Amino acid sequence: MPFRLALILSLAPLPALAHHPMGGEVPATLWQGFASGIGHPVIGPDHLAFLLAAGVLAATLGAGRGMVAIFAFVLGGFGGSLAHIAGIGFGPVEALVALSVVAVGLALLWRGVPAALVPVGFALAGLAHGHAFAEAIIGAEATPLAAYLFALALAQAAIGLGAMLVARRLGADAPRLRLPAGAVAMVTGVVFLASALAA
């Protein structure tokens, strides 16, 4: 089943990589900023794949360190968003996002990743994801911008921690969960990387 999902993702037409829940419009109100921030991690399959796989990987670290890893991603994302808003470029950010999805997939497939490096890797991935997410808010006024950033952090934390809790209940170290999750993340990342490089 996970491999079928990966195949479906690889065959699906890819939308424009700047994911816009508001139909391409910059949020103009507090509510629009909040709704856009909540929606962004869900409507971007590459971002969602990272968060779900990251939750599974975080679950293998234990509750405390797993939560630290998820919050490192969220804080990195906040920093990446602020960098974009300040006009600081990160280069081919969509390719970096896709590489982060490949990397979390590899980390799930290979059990030898040192646990202490996972929060660092998540923080670096967060920089790229946050930078990409900020594209939708460039040009917004202060109120929708603040609402967007708050809701974006909230949504990412909820998805990552939710995936971590589910994975812990299912047994995150069990190959039946870890291997399919890693494979789906890998395929998704490769598909989006190919799309980003072809653009």
Image (cartoon, rainbow, N blue to C red):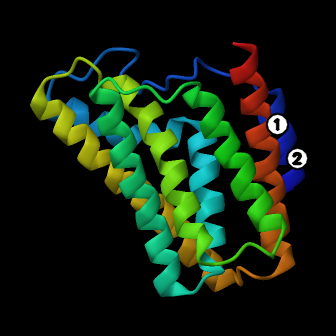
Measuring 62% from the left and 84% from the top, which residue is drawn there? 169
Q: Amino acid at mark 1?
A: Ile
For the residues marked 1 and 2, what is the alpha-carbon distance in whole angstroms? Answer: 6 Å
Q: Position of residue 61 (x, y in %)?
A: 61, 82
Task: Tell me if label 1 and label 2 are in contact, CB under 8 Å.
Answer: yes
Foreground: 195 or 32? Answer: 195
Vertical order, 146 against 167 (above or below)? above
Residue picked out by circle 2: 4
Residue 136 sits in which quadrant? top left
The N terminus: image quadrant:
bottom right
Determine crowd level at label 2: few under 14, some 14-19, many 20+ residues with C-alpha closer than 10 A.
few
Foreground: 43 or 57? Answer: 57
Residue picked out by circle 1: 8
Foreground: 23 or 74? Answer: 74
Q: Is residue 174 left or right of residue 39?
A: right
Mark 2: which secondary structure?
A: helix
Q: Position of residue 193 (x, y in %)?
A: 74, 31
Q: Position of residue 57 (x, y in %)?
A: 66, 70
Residue 170 sits in which quadrant? bottom right
Vertical order, 181 against 39 (above or below)? below
The C terminus: image quadrant:
top right
Mark 1: which secondary structure?
A: helix
Q: Amino acid at mark 2?
A: Arg
